[in-house]
Amino acid sequence: MSESKANKQTNSVHARRAIAYIVLIILSFLCLVWFYVLFINATRSNNQLKSGFTPLPSKYLVQNMRNLFNGATPVVQGMINSLIIAACSAVLCVYFSTMTAYGIHAYEFKGKKAIFTFILAIMMIPTQVSALGFIRLMNQMKLTDTYIPLIIPSIAAPVTFFYMKQYMESNLPASLIEAARIDGASEITIFNSIILPLMKPAIAVQAIFTFVASWNNYFTPNLIISSKMKKTLPILLAELRNSDWKTFDMGQVYAMIAFAIFPVIVVYLLLSKYIVGGVTAGGVKE
Amino acid sequence: MEKTVQKSNNVNKHNRWGYVFLIPFVVVFVVFQLIPLISTIYNSFFENYKSGLKQVGPNFIGIQNYITLFKSGDLPTYFKNTMIMWILGFVPQILVSLLLGAWFTDPSLRLKFQRFFKTVIYLPNLIMASAFSMLFFTLFSDSGPINSILVSIGIFAKPYSFMSHIWSVRGLVAMMNFLMWFGNTTILLMAGMMGIDQSLFEAAEVDGATATDIFFKITLPLLRPILIYVMITSLIGGLQMFDVPQILTNGKGDPMRSSMTLIMYLNKHLFSKNYGMAGALSVILLIITGILSMIVFKVSATNEK
């Protein structure tokens, strides 16, 4: 009796495991198939693309890429622009967010609690709601069509600040900070030479997330940048959609989308350990 | 006694540095967020737009912009569009994430290749939304590969025009949102599930509870705070929906503006320099997200106790 029950239970575990694998495989397929089709189509010529889809790659990838780089859209410049903005934003964001978090974490001063609560309260407010005032102010400050409005605001990043603060609470006890105070060294030196290295794991995770957010951002750069050679990749992609794409060489269109997507996938696969692990700590308090 | 006094002085001396460390954040926040926000609210009470080459205003008109927004019917329509596309994406997202989370954390299942699956389902989240929607636009275009496949295997007799039907456009937007966010939600819910005391599951198993019983009677009720957190942050994200429908429909929200979202509408006013209406729309969005984030704040605060 009890043996048959145990048997039944193992059977049901087997069945549930099989269902779980099938669902996971279907979902993985749904996540990846688009990029597979993109890759295939980026390797095919315009004529081949017009004659329908085939699941096997052709040999026009290099040709399509060459056409793309020689074309009218400055994609390489766009990628360099995106890289510069995203890298500068990530560096400034993690450095100053760590600094802000350290200011709140390590010191006792009047108004500290109020400031902390205030930062938490504004954490969820989207940047879009102040976009109108932002553009008008940037206009008055003659900063439109420069990268300053896209980079400097990342210094005040409540979400990154909150992550750093949480990390400090579990990894940076007061005794450690007290011990770090070497005689004669200023607080800034202590922060730069002792505290920052201790924060490396958190800094790596947040640098990646800030980089990605800035790299993918379309709304703000689209309102700020107007010169062709200063445009970022998302703006160039939106312009591709806006142009009369039917007259385009479709091989080149796919090559451009592939150019925007595949480098990110490669970097992601290299860093996926940090990224997937870093997701939770940003949102849910444990 | 002497020593304690000295020590507290020492601490006080250090503590002034707290303010110094906060200066960059506060200055940047005031200049790039607070002043723009105040100016946005201020602008919402003025009539200020370009009509052809003629500049109208700025004239103070009180809450007339808000009345126009509601009366013209645009705001309710775009709010409805945004909510429909959010719900279409969010419902499958939360169901799939709950299921996957329960499977990944179930010790009796011992699923293999977990890291591989997690890496794959999180991947679409990092893809540039503008590139992803441009990709979907080409794949689902009338002469694109999806139509070519569907016709060749005989599902459709002739290519289906995905971009000119209301529900196929909304469906595509929802599907992209689903693909981009279910991996992220799964990982968040998993963290919550792993935080549940394992002895509860063991006790339930000893008492003869099935996996389904355990999921509905133990996991789900204990996950409630995280579920609320996930739902409201997703709703706040949903209200900001922009890149995907903007690029998929080329900013038009076609067909018949049925996929036009609130932020697309804001973007349109910003480009046409209708500052009064853009301001009023921003303030309404600010109020909605403000209320929603207060709920998150409350939930997280009670969760902590």
Image (cartoon, rainbow, N blue to C red):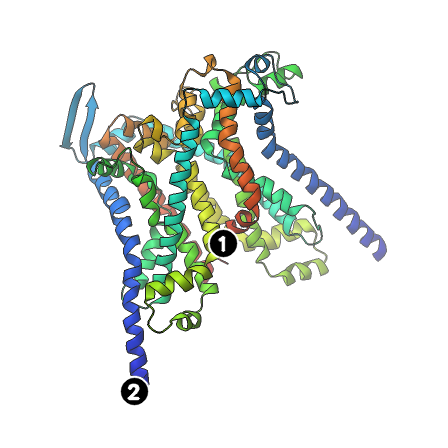
Picture quadrant where residue A147 is located: top left
Residue B283 seen by the camera: yes
- Image check: B34 left or right of A174? left
Q: Is residue B84 above or below residue B106?
A: above
Q: CA distance from mark 2 to mark 1?
A: 44 Å
Q: What label does residue B2 carry, if any?
A: 2
**Amino acid type shown at disc 2:** Glu
- Image check: B37 left or right of A204? left
Q: From the image, which quarter does the N terminus of chain A lie in?
A: bottom right
The residue sitting at 48% across, 24% down in the picture is B169
Q: Of A261 and B91, which appears nearest the observer?
A: A261
Residue B140 seen by the camera: no
* Disc 2 chain ID: B
Q: What label does residue A281 carry, if any?
A: 1
Q: What label does residue B70 carry, if any?
A: none
Residue B286 coordinates in the image, percent (x, y): 31, 42
Q: Nearer the viewer, mark 2 or mark 1?
A: 2
Q: Is residue B48 above or below residue A244?
A: below
Q: Of B280 and A129, which appears nearest the observer?
A: A129
Could you say whether the residue bearing mark 1 is in a helix, strand or loop? helix
Q: Of B94 and B244, which appears nearest the observer?
A: B244
| Contact check, label 2 and label 1, Cβ < 8 Å | no
Q: Are labels 2 and 1 on one chain?
A: no
Could you say whether the residue bearing mark 2 is in a helix, strand or loop? helix
**Amino acid type shown at disc 1:** Ala
* Disc 1 chain ID: A
Question: How many numbered discs, if any?
Answer: 2
Residue A249 coordinates in the image, percent (x, y): 50, 15
Crowd tier of the residue under label 1, counting other residues whose Cα lies within 10 Å: few below 14, some 14–19, many 20 or above = some
Crowd tier of the residue under label 2, counting other residues whose Cα lies within 10 Å: few below 14, some 14–19, many 20 or above = few
